[in-house]
Image (tube, rainbow, N blue to C red):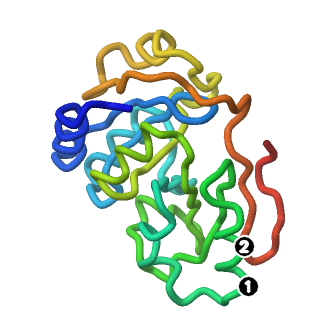
Amino acid sequence: MLANWRITRLNRLLQAGGVIAYPTEGVWGLGCNPWNGAAVERLLNLKQRPVHKGLILIAGEIEQFDFLLWDLPDGQLAKLRLSWPGPNTWLVPHQGRLPEWITGAHDTVALRVTTHPIVRQLCAAAGPLVSTSANPGGRPAARSRLRVEQYFHGELDAIVPGALGGARNPSIIRDLQTDQVIRGA
C-alpha cells in the first residue's frame, strides 16, 4: 500500500495529464487519465501504438464503470460481477460514452477491475485509468521497474513503487456479448 501523500501526488499528476508506470497483477502498466486526450496521445506515442487499436480502462471497483454498465442486460452484468475483481478484461459496448482516443475503431471498450492493491488505491483517488502494458510496440511487457526505466528513459512523470502480483501473464480478454476469447491468459 502507498502512503496517502504519494497517492495525492500521483492523482495530481494524472489529473494534470501525466503518464505513469505502475505494477499490476502480471506485468508493469502504463496509465493516464482517460478523459485527457493529450495524455492519451502521449501514452500512445510512448508505446508506439496506433489510436485505432483502442485501450483498456482499469478500475478498482465495478461501480467506477457504472456510466458504461447501467443499461447492460442483467445476464451480462452478472457475468461481469462474477469475474471482477480479477484477471478478466471484457469488451463491453461503449454506446458512444467514451472518446475515440480510448475506443479506437471499435464499438466496444476493454474494461477490467483489478485486484492489485496499489492500482486499486490509484483508481480510488483518480477514477478509472488507461492501463496498457509498459513496453514499446513489439517488445516484451516489462516485468521489472528496471525494464520500465530502460524502455522509457525518464519520459514518464512517475514510476509507482511496488511489486507485481502473482499472475504470470496479462489478463484474458473476452467479448462480453459473444464470450469469444480475444487474448488468452
**Residue 88 location, quadrant:** bottom right
Residue drawn at the location 24% of the way across and 37% of the way down:
10
Residue ID for mark 1: 75
In this picture, residue 6 sits left or right of residue 49:
left
Residue 25 x, y percent position in the rendering:
60, 35
- Residues 10 and 135: in front is 10
Number of numbered discs present? 2
Amino acid type of the residue tagged 1 in the rendering: Gly
Residue ID for mark 2: 79
- Crowding at dot 2, Cα within 10 Å, few <14 / some 14-19 / many 20+, comes out as few
Q: Which mark identifies residue 172?
A: none
Spatial separation of the CA atoms under disc 1 and disc 2:
6 Å
Q: Is residue 59 above or below residue 164?
A: below
Residue 105 x, y percent position in the rendering:
55, 65
In this picture, residue 52 sits left or right of residue 10:
right
Residue drawn at the location 32% of the way across and 31% of the way down:
2
- Crowding at dot 1, Cα within 10 Å, few <14 / some 14-19 / many 20+, comes out as few
Q: Is residue 47 above or below residue 140?
A: below
Q: Quadrant of the N terminus?
A: top left
Q: Is residue 89 above or below residue 169?
A: below
Residue drawn at the location 66% of the way across and 89% of the way down:
73
Q: Are marks 1 and 2 in contact (CB under 8 Å)?
A: yes
In this picture, residue 118 sits left or right of residue 72:
left
**Residue 82 location, quadrant:** bottom right
- Residues 53 and 60: in front is 60
Residue drawn at the location 79% of the way across and 42% of the way down:
185
In this picture, residue 79 sits left or right of residue 59:
right
Residue 121 x, y percent position in the rendering:
37, 44
Q: Is residue 177 above or below residue 49?
A: below
Amino acid type of the residue tagged 2 in the rendering: Lys
Q: Give the secondary structure at mark 1.
A: helix
Q: Give the secondary structure at mark 2.
A: helix
